[in-house]
Structure formats: structure tokens, C-alpha cells
Amino acid sequence: MPDRKYRFSWELIGDLALGRPNLGPSTRLEIYRLMQFTFRDVLEQHYGTEQTDQLFYQAGHLAGTEFYRQYLSEIKEFNAFIKSLQSSLKDMGMGILRVEKADVAQGSFILSVSEDLDCSGLPELHYEICTYDEGFIAGLLESFTGHQFKVKEIDCWCTGDRTCRFSAELIP
Ligand SMILES: [Zn+2]
């Protein structure tokens, strides 16, 4: 069977220095959100809300797994892993990560992300919207620990909190 057309690889990100000598590696957040929310709209029209959420979670999971592999895979100790993750997320303008609770032995965590790329500043929507982030965090934690996690956003900018807060629980 031939390989898939769109399998992710970091090569697809391209050589930004070569390709964008004047504009550089950054873009306006409106444009990132425009892409994300139009994707969501079209996916929902085709596949329904629940399936769309699952697809966003899975894409986020793949992103978290690849992000770990690309930037964090050398780190073996939990505090060093979190520290490095915090600075990468901040440097790349993705958000400000805080660990509010970490029970490493039980695999139980509460993480918050402020100024989140996906949702910070959105109108109040009465539902959490950061499904992609849930998957992203699950992908990171699973890559680091080798165990499966269930990640759920419990507070979001969109639900009136001014930060996104995620629970992450080890699946026994
Ligand atoms: Zn959120």
C-alpha cells in the first residue's frame, strides 16, 4: 500500500530562513485562529460536533507527540521536562504554562495555560474550546512517561476564567 499523502513530518514546516527572508517565522495570531476556526467549521459541517472535537484532540495529540520528539526528548527528569516545556511554549508564543498540582507517583496533574494561543481573548461561549490543547498535553505527557493520559480542560477563557486549566490523569 502506498504511503499516505499527508503524513506529518518536520520537513513540511520547511526552511523558514530560506522561504521567508523578509517576513520571518512569525505571523499574526488572527491568521492562525482564522485557519483553526474555519477548519473547525468545515469539519463540523461534514462530521458533526463530537467527531470534530475528536479530530482536534487527535491532531493536538500528534502535535504534542511530535513537539516532544523535536524539542524535549533528551530530558529524563520531570522538573527539568516541565521547565524546558515552559520556556519553549513561552518562547514560541504558545502560552504561559504553570503546574498547579503534580502528583508524579499517581500520574495526576493540574496544568494551566495563560494567554493561550487558541482561546485567550475569545468571547464567553459557555463551553471549553481548547480540545487541540487537551490532545497536545496528552501527547506530551504520554511521550514523556510512556503511559496513557486522559486530559480534560476544566476552565477556559471562554467559560469566564482568564486562564485555561487542564486536568491530566493517568489511565491505569
Ligand atoms: Zn481554553
Image (cartoon, rainbow, N blue to C red):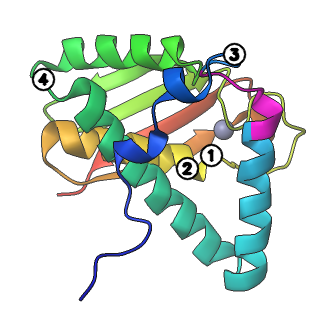
Q: Earlier in the sequence, mark 4 or mark 3?
A: 3
Task: Report the amino acid beneath label 3.
Answer: Asn
For the residues marked 2 and 3, what is the alpha-carbon distance in whole angstroms? Answer: 30 Å
Amino acid type, residue under disc 2 in the picture: Tyr
Which residue is rendered at x = 35% and y = 36% of the image?
Answer: 67
Q: Which of the two discs, 2 and 3, labels the residue nearer the N terminus?
A: 3
Q: Is residue 102 magenta?
A: no
- The segment highlighted magenta reads 25-31
Closest to the camera, between mark 3 and mark 1, is 3
Task: State yes or no: discs 4 and 2 in contact (Cβ < 8 Å).
Answer: no
**CA distance for labels 1 and 2:** 5 Å
Q: CB atoms at circles 4 and 1 under 8 Å apart?
A: no
- Marks 1,2: beta carbons within 8 A: yes
Residue 36, percent from left and from top: 71, 51
Rendered-image quadrant of the N terminus? bottom left
Residue 127 seen from this side: no
Q: Secondary structure at mark 4?
A: loop
Task: State the SS at label 2.
Answer: helix
Residue at 40% over, 40% down = 137
- Disc 1 element: loop
- Of labels 4 and 2, earlier in sequence is 4
Q: Which mark is residue 22?
A: 3
| Residue marked by disc 4 | 74
> Would you name the residue on which mark 1 appears?
130
- At label 1, the amino acid type is Cys
**Label 3 crowd bin: few (<14), some (14–19), many (20+), radius 10 Å:** few
Q: Residue at x 17, y 29 (%)?
A: 73
Image-based side of 118 in relation to 113, left or right: right
Choose between 9 and 33: the one closer to the eye: 9
Residue 30 counted in the magenta span: yes
In this rendering, the answer to whether 53 lies above or below 115 is: below
Q: Is residue 145 left or right of residue 138?
A: left
